[in-house]
Amino acid sequence: MTKLTIPNDALCVADYQRLAKKCLPHPIFEYVYGGGGDEFTMQRNRDAFDKLAIWPRVLNDVTHGTTSTTVLGATWRTPMMLAPVAFQTMAHEQGEWATAEAASALEVGMMTSTLSSRSLESISKKITSPKWFQLYWQIDRTFNIALVRRAEKAGYSALVVTVDSAIHGIRNRAQRAGFVLPEGVEAVNLTDRPPLPSKAFTPDQSIVFQGMMSEAPTWEDITWLIQQTSLPVIIKGILHPSDALKAKAIGAKGVVISNHGGRTLDCVPSAIDVLPAIREQVGNDFVVLMDGGIQRGTDVFKALALGANAVLIGRPQLYALAVAGAVGVAHMLRILREELEVTMALAGTARVQDITTASLYYPH
Ligand SMILES: Cc1cc2nc3c(=O)[nH]c(=O)nc-3n(C[C@H](O)[C@H](O)[C@H](O)COP(=O)(O)O)c2cc1C
């Protein structure tokens, strides 16, 4: 196994992105980095954070300060979790195993993707922090249940159902770079999936509506799924307050506000922009997580101020994994935690619950 160390110039998340560009094959970097369409949403994810300002309070005693928080009844060391990210052996030979070790070392939770390149059971064994399983709906209901039962048996404590990517985005950047999954990288959790029924289309039918979307889940499917498991179900990929409310009404225990890192439909809002409206709609007792564009502890702080219980970290885990394996991911997570601590200390907020909308400044 290659021995990887932390480069001296890896000081923040953006450094890991810069360094990953040098060490990943070009098509893989472009696939990981890129978004859908013209990448307007991907850019908006960053712009929306940048335009928010933190309004610091001075001289508060923060010596009892802590980043710990409670999500779904569990104590988290930091209000952060690793987002589900597929095919991690693309970035490092250990893939999800290395990420799981890093998450555990930093006491950060991890969402294991359906499209992991390691088995969900073997990843679970390496996670000692909160672990949730992310489900991509499969057309065969029985196969969904088989995956859910495996996740339950493997000790995952929640199920995250991603609903925003029934069709992959139109990823021109990855296409231009000629991205294909490298040989040997595969969705090992789906190897015994029943073959998809072959379809013939008449000239007046569409491969989108009558093809791909005929395999996509509906509210009825997700309601059914929630009834099949004792695990709390979180719906990932919500942007509209009415959909968040609907998720709550069908029995979901939370939502992840997300545009998939700008990788699916382009021209949609950033998660941070819609967060206040969603929080207002679902009330304070419902779990609201968000992701998209988080690169700094100040970003985590801004999301908490606008009502998120915690945030998810997507691409940075693959960048750090590519640069320095498990050590890199652990280092990246420590950077984010320490940046959040610095932000909280200098903003005069000792505890996560002290961070509120009053912690942000809006110019008149
Ligand atoms: C390479 C890559 C693979 C991803 N795979 C999944 C996945 O398997 N399941 C899922 O729900 N989301 C997936 N996502 C989306 C992330 O979970 C997350 O929503 C997004 O990356 C957050 O934005 P950020 O990368 O700016 O932090 C993936 C994202 C990337 C970049």
Image (cartoon, rainbow, N blue to C red):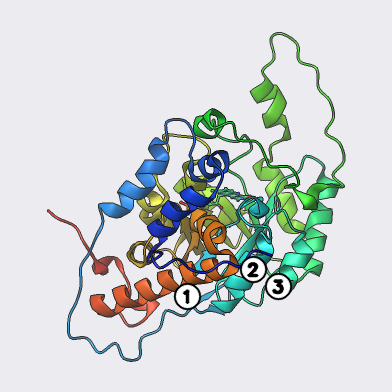
The kind of residue tagged 3 is Lys
- At numbered mark 1, what does the secondary structure look like: helix, strand or loop? loop
Q: Which mark is residue 126?
A: 3
Q: Which mark is residue 78?
A: 1
- Image location of residue 13, percent across then percent down: 41, 61
State which tag comes first along the sequence, 2 or 3. 2
User: What is the spatial separation of the Cα atoms under label 1 and label 3, in whole angstroms?
Assistant: 19 Å
- In depth, the one of 135 and 12 nearer the eye is 12
User: What is the spatial separation of the Cα atoms under label 1 and label 2, in whole angstroms?
Assistant: 16 Å
Residue 15, above or below 183: below
Q: Residue at position x 50%, y 60% from top?
A: 312
One can see residue 361 in this view: yes
| Camera-nearest label, 1 or 2 | 2
- The residue labelled by disc 2 is 100
Q: Are marks 2 and 3 in contact (CB under 8 Å)?
A: yes
- Image location of residue 211, percent across then percent down: 71, 25
Relative to residue 186, is residue 71 drawn left or right? left
The kind of residue tagged 2 is Ala
Residue 95, above or below 331: above
- In depth, the one of 162 and 129 nearer the eye is 129
Q: Are marks 1 and 3 in contact (CB under 8 Å)?
A: no
